[in-house]
Every structure is written in structure tokens, then in C-alpha cells.
Image (spheres, rainbow, N blue to C red):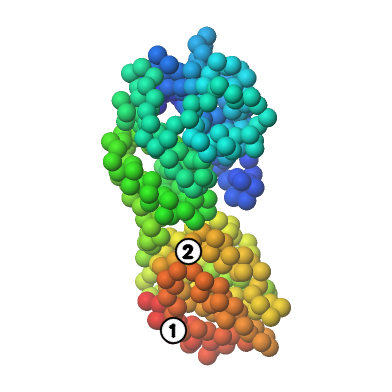
Amino acid sequence: MFVTDSVKYIGVDDKDIDLFESQYVVPDGVSYNSYVIMDDKIVIMDTVDARATDEWVKNLKDVLGDKLPDYLVISHLEPDHAANIQKAAEMYPDMKLVGNAKTFQMLPQFFDMDIEGRCVTVKEGDELSIGSHTLQFFMAPMVHWPEVMVTYEKSEKILFSADGFGKFGAIDSEDDEDWACEARRYYINIVGKYGAQVQALLKKASGLDIAIICPLHGPVLTENLGYYIEKYDIWSSYRPEDSGVLVAYASIHGNTGKAAKECADMFKAKGIEHIEFMDLSRDDMAEAIEAAFRYDRMVLASATYDGGLFPVMEDFLAHLKSKNYQKRKVALIENGSWGPVAAKKMREMLETMKEIEFCEKTVSIKSVMKEEDKKAIAELVDAMM
């Protein structure tokens, strides 16, 4: 696949993977993106996961023919991008490795290889001329590892954005699906904690004239780049993307779930367009996290369990905290047959997060929802409108 006449795509789709990073469901697979820039000097931009080694090597050789690469740029050392650094270095013994000081500090943690005399160490703003193309390097620490950097190719205005602007899904699975759906789930669950660092990178990118974005996962972006950049600005500043409500519940025998459903139906009757209703025991946790960040309001309903929270609710709240959840309004519904404390426990966890506004109405149910509980839920819904 051609990105431009000079920039070739040599990445690989992985459609057999069940869990990305051993935790994220990827029903449409994932792509591991790698590129080659052909010029007086030839540059490989990153490698791929070990799951895709053979196909990547074939793609690389098909592009290079009998030519030899001069440089391998290492944007990010995470194994889904860097697993084949040693293999490439052994295939092309004269090829130099381009990275920053942190890259080469961490590289020996992954590979037992001799890099003496092969490292080109770059820092913020450094340039590498390879002919008609010039690569400029910008550090992106903690987006989302400390060694991450992005590369801007000046002549064709291409940003090689590392994990930035990536998404779940194999490239050949792309159809008319909204890019933001799987890009949002990818960003919030993987990079979401590091909003301040992403904001710093966006500030650097704002000074560049970018025509093409080449991420390490997902499609190459060539049109409407302002749309993608705006999404990243919203996500990384923790602003709600849409006006709407996530109703998420943790129910043991179904009674808490019925109360949550009553709540969601009441929001729908009030004309709320965006309502996500999620069973934390069964629905994808990553999608629940995505929805929590997408909307400006959230209702949590949990059973009391062993004097605390039902475990999936506790896990959900721990995920929210780890991803820096903030700036949202939250309402609580609890259930307990003899000693309901779920609301108290949920609030305690939420109070450790930034700028959480609590709804003045909390609903406490004893075992099975009664008419008076429905009235209390209606009052909660009114208070969240």
C-alpha cells in the first residue's frame, strides 16, 4: 500500500488476536503499522508485533527489493511495535537505529543485542536529512511510555504519530464505521491517564503543517485532520464529548439491574438522546470506561456485597480512577437486603477523583424495587436533567 509515492505501508493486520494487551476485546482485530520511506537514504519507521513477523518481513523485502535500509526509527518500544528490532538489525547489519536517549536506555531490557556504534540518538527538534525528505523528531514522553517520540516528515508534511491517533480494528476491516468509536475506546483505555502529556504533544503538533497522519494502529489519516485533532483535544482535556448519560450497574440476582433499567427508561422518556445502559458483569469493561468518559453524566447502581461493593463495580471505579476520570456529574443507586452501604463505598472512591459533582439525590433500595423506590429514582432523574 502506498501512503505517497515515496512512503510505503508495510504493516500487518492481525485478525486472529482475541485480546489486545491481554485485556481489550478486539472483534475486528488490530493493525500493526510500519512504513518505509524511500529516498537517497532508506528509512524503516518501526516494526511490528512478534505475531506478525513473517508477513512483515515479506512486506519489507517486497518494498526494498535488493536495496538496503539505512535507518530504523524507533518511535515506541512497546512489543506490539518493536518486537522485530533485533531481527531487522540482524538482517541489515549496516542499518543504524534512530531513537532518543530513553529509547537506548530501555532497549536492552527487551533485546540481548550489540548496538555499539549503531545508535543515532536524537533529541527535541533534531533533524535527519535522507535526500529530498527531512525527518524532524519531537519527544512525547508518557504518551504513553517515557521513551515515545513522533516524527514529522517536512517535505510531504507527514506526522508519524506513534500510538497517537490509533484505533482498534484491522485496516482491511474498515468500512463506513465511525472512526471515533474504536479510536475513543483505544485512546481512553490505553492513553487516557496521560491527558496532560497528550495536550503537550498537541501543542507541538499545532506548530506543524500536517497533511497526513500515520499512526501505529489503524488507518492512515489523510482528510479532515481537524476532526481527529479536535477529538484528541476533547479526550485529553477530559471534557465530555457529548451530552448524555451512562447508566452502569452491578447486580447479583437482577434486582439492582431492574432499578438501573427503570432509571435508564426514565431518562429516555425525558428525551435524553444519548443513553448507554451497561451491565458491568457482562458488558465489555473497556466500552463502559469509554462511555463514562464520553458523556457528561453517569448513574451507578450497585448491590452491597460482603459489607462493600459488588466486585465488578469496584473494578469499574478503579479503572476510572486509573484513567483520570473527572469533570462529570454522578448519581448513585444502592441495594442491600440488611445493610446497604454501596452508595457510601462508591462515593468514597469517586471522591478521590477530580471535579466530580454528586447528585443531591441518592436512592437506597432494600432487596426488591418498590413503588416508593421508583418515585425516588424519578427524583434522581429529575435532579440529573
For disc 2, the neighbor class at 10 Å (few under 14, some 14 to 19, many from 20) is many
Tell me the amino acid under the disc marked 2: Tyr
Q: What residue sits 28% from the left and 36% below the top? A: 209
The circle on residue 300 is: none
- Residue 16: horizontal and vertical position, in percent? 63, 38
Q: Is residue 116 above or below residue 104?
A: above
The residue indicated by pointer 2 is 325
Q: Position of residue 338 (x, y in %)?
A: 68, 88
Circle 1 packing at 10 Å, graded few (<14), some (14-19), many (20+), is few
Q: Residue at x 48, y 35 (%)?
A: 100
Looking at the rendered structure, the secondary structure element under dot 2 is loop
Q: Nearer the viewer, residue 380 or 74?
A: 74
Task: Write the residue at 51% across / 36% down.
Answer: 101
Query: Is residue 265 in view from this perspective?
Result: no
Q: Which mark is residue 360?
A: 1
- Name the N-terminal-most of marks 2 and 1: 2
The amino acid sitting under disc 1 is Glu
**Res 29 quadrant in image:** top right
Looking at the figure, which quarter contains the C terminus? bottom left
**Farthest residue, direction bottom:** 372
Above or below for 252 versus 136: below
Q: Is residue 92 visible?
A: yes
Percent x, y for residue 227? 32, 46
Q: What's the distance in space between the residues labelled 2 and 1, CA to CA?
A: 20 Å
Corner quadrant of residue 47: top right
Q: Nearer the viewer, residue 180 or 108?
A: 108
Element assignment for label 1: strand
Q: Mark 2 or mark 1: which is in front?
A: 2
Q: Quadrant of the rendered structure where residue 284 is?
A: bottom right
Residue occupying the point 35% across, 24% down:
134
* Residue 37 pos. (x, y %): 43, 22
